[in-house]
Amino acid sequence: MTSAPVSAHAPDPSSASAAAVAPPRSLAPDVARGLMLALIAVANVSWYLWRSTESVGGTPHIPADGPLDTIAQAVMTIAVDHRAMPLFAFLFGYGMVQFYRSRIDRGLAPGAVRVMMRRRHWAMLLLGALHAALLFYGDILGVYAVSALVLVWWFFGRRSRTLRIWVIVLAAVMALFALFSIVSGVALTYFVPAEVTAEMAATDMGTGFTRPLAYDTPYLVSVLYRLGLWAVSLPFAALMGAPLPILLGWLAARRRILDEPWRHVRLLRRTAVIGIAIGWLGGVPEALAILGLYELPAAAPWMLTGLTSLTGIACGIGYAALFGLLALRLEGRAPADDAPRPDTSADRDLSPPSAPTACPARRAHRTAAATSASSSGPSPRWGSAR
């Protein structure tokens, strides 16, 4: 009987001592994921309130039934709506790099790991389609699955500098979309004939239109409606809203920011303060409309959606940083003096080591390999050198 082939990057048995002195795994990624799920549960509450088919502005909230409802909706608009989903996307991207790192450290070949990732994302897409068809047309599993399939194919393995450039490009596109939405809403209000805006206002394309289709028809018919509503919104959400936080998650994972939060305390503090401040301020305009302090144009209730989506990404990443600091406090770990500079040898996510004998624990914790660079030859790389 022949033995199974072993990857050229299999861990060296002599690395046991190095693994023994490695710092214990941080709680930060798990704490962030757990609190993220709690926020998503809160964010989805408004979708399951059936007292009215009307919605408030461009939100899923129904008209408030008293001051407590109004206050709760305003708080959710500022702190939860459009904030929990970007946090999900950021941690999803972070987990993709963690998954790749763990499989490489177990000795799997890079190509095999990428195949595993594609299979996981196709499975997510299937689960998302089933979720949308059977239960909820606002499913997000499919959104992140499509985005991951595209991003892994096109970006996974590119240099961090390339990812940062694309982060700036995507943020600029979203900022332009937010500005265009606001300007369009103002133009519709002041420069379009009243009869035209009245006709537009009478055409409800929000939850008042989609909910009856998705839930007030016979179940088998509603399956087709839900699947159709999900499929229509899927490409835009997957290619417009999800890529930016996923790429930011990749960049954070390359620097092990949540894996080793004690090395990045200053960065985490700045990110938490600035990100959450931007996110909450970005939610104030829509919250003021919910409080009744002004009315969004009836013909353009969507005019603030771009603003809340863009600032929500900043807020979601701020929450991730805050949860990292919380985990650091729970662990009782003292902050390190300085974070190590990013390792250029790991610039392409987790490039295979420069020498076959380099141990996974040393790669993971950025200590030098025992084998000299002169004897290792050229560094093997996975992915294309784009």
Image (cartoon, rainbow, N blue to C red):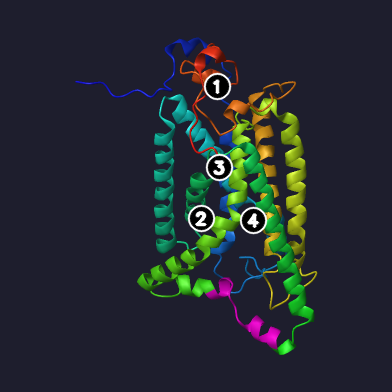
Q: Position of residue 128 (x, y in %)?
A: 44, 55
The residue at which mark 3 appears reads as: 93
Q: Which of the 4 image quarters holds residue 339?
A: top right
Q: In the rendered structure, which amino acid carries the disc numbered 2? A: Val
Please name the residue shown 22% across and 21% down the image: 2
The tag on residue 363 is 1
Which stretch appears magenta? Answer: 196-209
Quarter of the C terminus within the rendering:
top right
Q: Is residue 184 above or below residue 33?
A: below
Q: Position of residue 274 (x, y in %)?
A: 77, 44
Which label's residue is closer to the chain start, 4 or 2?
Answer: 4
Judged left or right of residue 287, residue 218 is left
The tag on residue 82 is 4
Structural crowding at the residue carrying mark 2, measured as other residues with C-alpha within 10 Å and reported as few (<14), some (14–19) or many (≥20): many
Q: In the rendered structure, which amino acid carries the disc numbered 1? A: Arg
Judged left or right of residue 277, residue 18 is left
Q: Position of residue 63 (x, y in %)?
A: 65, 71
Q: Position of residue 113 (x, y in %)?
A: 42, 35
Nearer the observer: mark 2 or 1; the answer is 1
Q: Quick check: marks 4 and 2 in contact, CB under 8 Å?
A: no
CA gap, disc 1 to disc 3?
20 Å
Magenta: predominant secondary structure element?
helix
